[in-house]
Amino acid sequence: MPEQPPWWTRAVVYQVYPRSFQDSDGDGIGDLGGILQRLDHLADLGVDVVWLSPVYPSPQADNGYDISDYEDVDPLFGTLGQFDELIAGLHARGIRLVMDLVVNHTSDEHPWFVESRSSPDSPKRDWYWWRPPRPGMAPGAPGAEPTNWHSFFSGPTWELDPASGEYYLHLFAAKQPDLNWENPEVRQAVYAMMRRWLDRGVDGFRMDVINMISKDVAPDGSLHDGPPLPGVPYGDGSASFLCGPRIHEFLQEMHREVFAGRPDRLLTVGEMPGVTVEQARLFTDPARGEVDMVFQFEHVGLDFDESKWRPRPLRMRDLKASFGRWQAGLAEVGWNSLYWDNHDQPRAVSRFGDDSPRHRRDSATCLATLLHLHRGTPYVYQGEEIGMANFPFTALEQFRDVESLNHHVQAVAHGADAGEVLAAMRRMSRDNARTPVQWDASPNAGFTTGTPWIAVNPDHAEWNAQAQRADPDSVFAHHRRLIALRHEDPVVALGDFTMLLPEHDEVYAFTRSLDGDTLLVVCNLGGSAQDLAGLLPEAVGAGVVLGNMPEDDPAVLRPWEARVLRPAR
Ligand code: TEU
């Protein structure tokens, strides 16, 4: 690790999903004006960076992850002027702003794609992936798609353009055509756009599915089918687009063209589904000049097997093995990001904790303690700091997310029981993370004076920021203490990680050590008390640095209790 560890080793990032954060004009959709109203909430929490999910002009087919203009703000969310106000307001509070960079694909309404689709001879045709039907098949015939790949949002990854009789590639929705990064014009256009946002005062980028930009294309331009998937007439194309053959070349070029020579106040995090520890070590090795950290998905894939729509209970040993592997794998080189929640994952307190009235506060603060005391940069998703839980969905009409709705259509079309599909969506849909932030107990939780685009969780009367900001025992207060501890204690930021009790099914315990100073962290992720004295005698008598419950019997770890201890040297 270079002499002065980078600032983000001590930082905590807060993710804002603008549609659901705070509405300021009564249209039921959150906006920049709303974020400006809530800056003190962020400052009070103590976060160092705001990651802002997309606010660019977009037809909102995927809530802004389908961009039709990279250089402006969608009127739905406000204006460039308000954006500049936001940068100024955050910077005035010592908070940096990281933008969402969505350049694996654009919207199909982006002028680049409109031009590209206009004619096979368009100078921008090669800015996207256009291919003729599978040899010997007529355009539009079942199975005529150039490859058998399954889209992340169900259905094939190819959409036919009747005018040209050719198909274009979209790993996500049909309104999200993939850019062709093999084309240097595309790359230079993206780099120039990024430089303009940095010149405007932005402090970095969260890069959407950035490990998908390099496709494994043969010299003759052909792309390979993937192995068949169960239950659908498609195959898994991931071997052709996850961490493709030129991914490191592209990220190093981006670093040279956009970040090199800029002051080190920037942060870059690459969202990388399917990335391995070994690959992450290459991506985050500072000597290679690619990204500062990655979002890996291993731990948010431990409670289901081949499909998130068939969830099963999380096995604690799997979680320990996964976190332990990533902590060890990036101990010498690279850096971890740490997260439970984001706008794509159901709420962790409902998924990995216990959101019943008796244990919700304790399990939310226990999960937070576990996460924030690992080595890496923690990410707090809006609402996580007040223990927001999954929504009690009961009907299809309540959902909004393209991934969930497309899944329902495809699953029922392939014979699944609609009730079972709905039950799985209730647990795993991304919409669980997208209900409006609960600011107070008023009708729409203080989110809007209009009709919210998605329903407010009925539990907001009890679970809201206003109630918690004044309560020293609240989930909010506990997050504030965790963030302060990372700022104050170098062991938390930089200490070496050692997993303890790897086989225990309830107690998650580990140490962090730096220059002979050690913290012992013990978390009971279960509903029954644990004999801490028996499990870890050194924990009894150790000084309590931070706990999520009032001190009691040091020999017993209560259900969902977490303690950060400093054993005598
Ligand atoms: O997500 C990529 C991604 O991996 C998700 O699709 C994830 O696998 C899935 O949602 C889990 O159910 C990014 C953005 O975070 C997401 O919001 C976008 O929908 C997607 O890319 C396309 O831009």
Image (cartoon, rainbow, N blue to C red):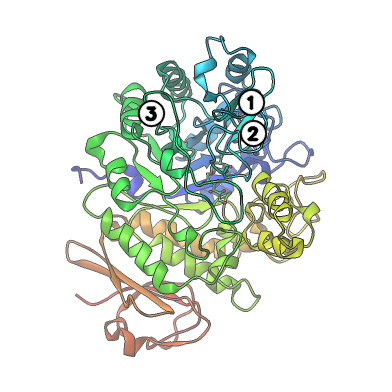
Q: Which mark is residue 218?
A: 3
Q: Quadrant of residue 310?
A: bottom right
Q: Looking at the image, is 394 positioned above or below residue 158?
A: below
Residue 144 seen from this side: yes
* Amino acid type, callout 1: Asp
Residue 472 seen from this side: no
Q: Which residue is mark 1?
A: 108
User: CA gap, disc 2 to disc 3?
Assistant: 24 Å
* Amino acid type, callout 2: Ala
Q: Horizontal and vertical percent for residue 174?
A: 64, 33
Q: Horizontal and vertical percent for residue 70?
A: 56, 24
Callout 2 crowding tier (Cα within 10 Å): few <14, some 14–19, many ≥20: many
Q: Horizontal and vertical percent for residue 382?
A: 58, 51
Callout 1 crowding tier (Cα within 10 Å): few <14, some 14–19, many ≥20: many
Question: Considering the image in quadrants, where does the C terminus appear?
Answer: bottom left
Q: Looking at the image, is 44 positioned above or below residue 271?
A: below
